[in-house]
Image (cartoon, rainbow, N blue to C red):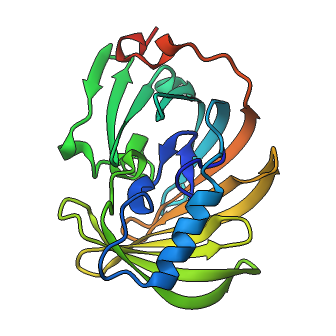
Amino acid sequence: MLQPSRFFVLRLFPGVLLLGSLLQAPAHAADDPAARKILDATVAKNSAGFQTGQSTTLLTLRLQNGKEKTWQTLARVARKDAKLRTRVTFLAPADSVGVELLMLEQGRGQTTQYLYLPKTRRLRRMGGSDRNSAFMGTDFSFGDLEGRGLQVGEAKKLGAEVIGGVPCTKIDVRSQDPEDPYGHVEIWVDEAKSVARQMKFYGKDGAHQKTLIVDEVAEVEGRATLKKFRMLSHVRGSVTTVTTQAIDTRAALPDALFEPESLGR
């Protein structure tokens, strides 16, 4: 994946945030100052990250019964008026070719999503009821991509742990958003590289729903970049692996690419 510019954890696609507003929110009154300092410092370090370009990415879903499906995507991202715009186009397999997702950041943790389905030639603006739906059947929801979740949370430092051989600081952030499906998220921050090495997502009932594990971090243009990571669903016993194939930070991306009416063209 391409380097996060406002949120240090990850992007499923360049410009597409996973719980991106988690760290953009103002500090909550009940914050642990030590935890908030780590989060703020990490965001600041990444604030000049990837802003424009494209990447090709593989998403592989492995179900509990062992069956697998892999998608290839082309993701293009550009910033305009300090807001990120992202267009994701599915290149493979045949039954998904031409599916497109457009995400337009509105600010204050808000993002507008449009989904284009070539079989029906239908352009749909995704609403709140779609937030918990699985994105293309993977273990990522549209809400995960939107980056609206946990806009106001209480951060607390829980100590230090080694994840994948890397020393990390463990931080818990509890959601104050009644519409968010997650009650709290535990994050293991690799402070040296300003990325998360692991995240655990819990429902409002306390049930452990998902775990995100970062398998590979590489340096791209001097910045730590997530090259491979997995989302495990503990509800359905599946796992989705995301792998970056190529990154082009110099691609020409005209404004017209990010107009809803351009999807499917």
Query: 38 left or right of 202?
Result: right
Asked if 232 appears above or below 5 in the picture, the reply is below
Query: 81 left or right of 216?
Result: left
Residue 62 appears anywhere in the view: yes
Look at 49% across and 42% down and name the residue there. Answer: 16
Residue 187 appears anywhere in the view: no
Asked if 93 appears above or below 222 in the picture, the reply is above
Look at 26% across and 34% down and name the residue there. Answer: 126
Give the total number of marks visible in the rendering. 0
Look at 67% across and 48% down and name the residue there. Answer: 243
Q: Position of residue 61 (x, y in %)?
A: 53, 51
Image-quadrant location for residue 21: bottom left
Judged from this view, the residue extending furthest toward the top is 265
Asked if 83 appears above or below 217 in the picture, the reply is above
Query: 211 left or right of 244?
Result: left
Asked if 19 appears above or below 48 in the picture, the reply is below
Q: Position of residue 222 (x, y in %)?
A: 82, 50
Look at 81% across and 52% down and name the residue there. Answer: 219
Image-quadrant location for residue 124: top left
Q: Nearer the viewer, residue 183 or 141?
A: 183
Q: Position of residue 92 (x, y in %)?
A: 58, 28
Q: Position of residue 135 (x, y in %)?
A: 39, 43
Q: Nearer the viewer, residue 132 or 17?
A: 17
Q: Nearer the viewer, residue 30 or 202?
A: 30
